[in-house]
Image (tube, coloured by chain):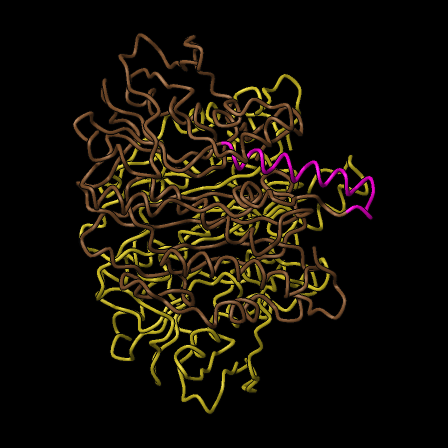
Chain colours: A brown, B yellow
Amino acid sequence: MFDNKEKTNIEALGEFGLINHLTKNIELVQKSTLKGVGDDAAVLDPAGKKVLVSTDMLLEGIHFDLAYTPLKHLGYKAVQVNLSDIYAMNGIATQVTVGIGMSSKFPIEAIEEIYEGIYIACEKYGVDLVGGDTSSSKQGLVLSVTSIGYANPEDIVYRDGAQEGDLICVSGDLGGAYVGLQLLEREKLVYLENPNIQPDLEGKDYIVERQLKPEARKDIVELLKDIDVKPTAMIDVSDGLASEIMHICKQSHKGCSLYEEKIPIDPMTYETAREFGLDPTVCALSGGEDYELLFTVKQADYEKIKFKMDISIIGHITEPASGCNLVSKSGNVHPLKAQGWNAFPADDQTIK
Amino acid sequence: MFDNKEKTNIEALGEFGLINHLTKNIELVQKSTLKGVGDDAAVLDPAGKKVLVSTDMLLEGIHFDLAYTPLKHLGYKAVQVNLSDIYAMNGIATQVTVGIGMSSKFPIEAIEEIYEGIYIACEKYGVDLVGGDTSSSKQGLVLSVTSIGYANPEDIVYRDGAQEGDLICVSGDLGGAYVGLQLLEREKLVYLENPNIQPDLEGKDYIVERQLKPEARKDIVELLKDIDVKPTAMIDVSDGLASEIMHICKQSHKGCSLYEEKIPIDPMTYETAREFGLDPTVCALSGGEDYELLFTVKQADYEKIKFKMDISIIGHITEPASGCNLVSKSGNVHPLKAQGWNAFPADDQTIK
């Protein structure tokens, strides 16, 4: 992804020099950030609100492949993946801390690229980078992000509040990130076999971006507030629709019916899945990494929700005895299977 | 450290099964924990206090060597290292999140041991484990801990408040963790050369524990509160006394004089350093990983502090122009050098 020629080695700066170098231009935008980088801990003022905290790691070879992941995108994605968890609580993300472990053989320019992606994500989402840890790694690139957000107690949405009859909604479209990954993996193989052939991603920007540069749905949290709809349960789609709705149903002690024909799939996702011999619905159900919001609302909120362009109503919550089901386009009922990403795969076929 | 015979592979449980398995017995003790593990984010109630957040990573081959680090100790230490940062702000730690990346070839029993150490640390320090991330790693063991604590705004102590004439104090004793590491490294080499020779750590429990199982100084924060002393500046000793006092002086725009004869060094640390041909004072100044608290207090607080068994007064803050100096036992003045641990060493001689 980058060459080492005429680059500055990280070891030349030392840990404190590196941290200073990377954080010297931070501009804090959140009033709740009393102290950011530069002491033993950051100091935050929640001003009476409840505090939301979530943490995620991205590990080279498991969650990303540097063969086709630009470092700037990686920094951006590491932040998005975490912000998404705060939005999934119906909160607003305000701060992140970032831990990065990377080889001391990496040039400074490489870690700068990662930070550039982190800063772009922070700026776009109004989030302050308030701390972190930078270390040498003997084992490839490691990113660990913790995100912090706030919410009024009455606004927080858990996974366990879905009621029978509630409508199941999802933002955006699904399956794109997974199909984008298939495309990147294919082009990597082509390249490895013949380095003279350039990757053929022409016209596939949307699904490649869904994989490399996902966007957390802060806008949906804001929209729901604007139209005065508080979901009864919410989760973000990191492991695939099937796995996520089953989390909501399990924690709410309910069942569900999803309608295949209602699941939002972008035409490019659909077409490219077909090219790969994949069922687009399965990509949406099990692909993961879309970072859309999946939520349930009371039927009484139907009128408020129904014409919102970026929200699809894809099913409803049922009594627990009927289980979690998919009603296919032909009207058959199939029990859902959580085939979401397994973080401990038996082989190397991870999809995340 | 463990064999794979008749052990359960992590992949057999899957990510969610594993998380359930590891977190099912969590008992939350902090009133401020409204929701712990099990949703997109933890929900915390700071009840009007300010929130302190700090994060640290421990990477195999850089921060620990599994050849002599029991997994339970590793989990314990990962938590302590983080809590120490909260205490260094004069706050009380209340919650942690833990990210663990480990090979899918590890048996469940291995990750259980790490979690056991984490839980023991949490219980002892009254801290709730409220979230985290568990993932396969292709690159050795990775631990990332974020700690959260609270403090009244008027109690928070930063690094930048030291004033000329303030007394420099440190808790406990220094250099032990570094000398303990030398001992473990030596016994590892002996073992590698002749696996029939058992490690000779007899009578060295204290310094081995200083390295493998450090204790964050919550008790010092409580003591200072009891005797009504608020430090003017504070930092925890993770990178060695010299590096840490220079952080305080730099951020406070001051100088300092440290007195070699006042630096607290345990007799076992002293004796073992000598066995290795090391200068005990250099071990205290540059060794790091002691996780003691280094702080400055007003001279007016001298009477309150002077007879406290576990606090040593080791110097005073000076005007900035005189720089940071060590007054040796023979009365010579040497400028301090920050030889603290470099997270990006040019070679493999890391001391942390």
Where B118 sits versus B315, above or below?
A: above
**Residue at 71% in and 59% down:** A2
The quarter of the picture where residue A55 lies is: top left
Depth check: B229 or B155 in front? B155
Which portion, as a residue range, is magenta? Answer: A175-197
**Residue at 55% in and 58% down:** B176
Where B119 sits versus B178, above or below?
A: above
User: Residue B194 appears at what percent x and percent y?
Assistant: 81, 39
Residue B343 lies in magenta, yes or no? no
Depth check: B256 or B132 in front? B132
User: Residue A204 appears at what percent x and percent y?
Assistant: 60, 42
Residue B105 seen in the figure: no
The quarter of the picture where residue B67 lies is: top right
Depth check: B76 or B129 in front? B129
Where A164 sits versus A115, above or below?
A: above
**Residue at 24% in and 27% down:** A161
Where B170 sits versus B10, above or below?
A: below
**Image quarter in which the N terminus of chain A is found:** bottom right
Depth check: A72 or A313 in front? A313
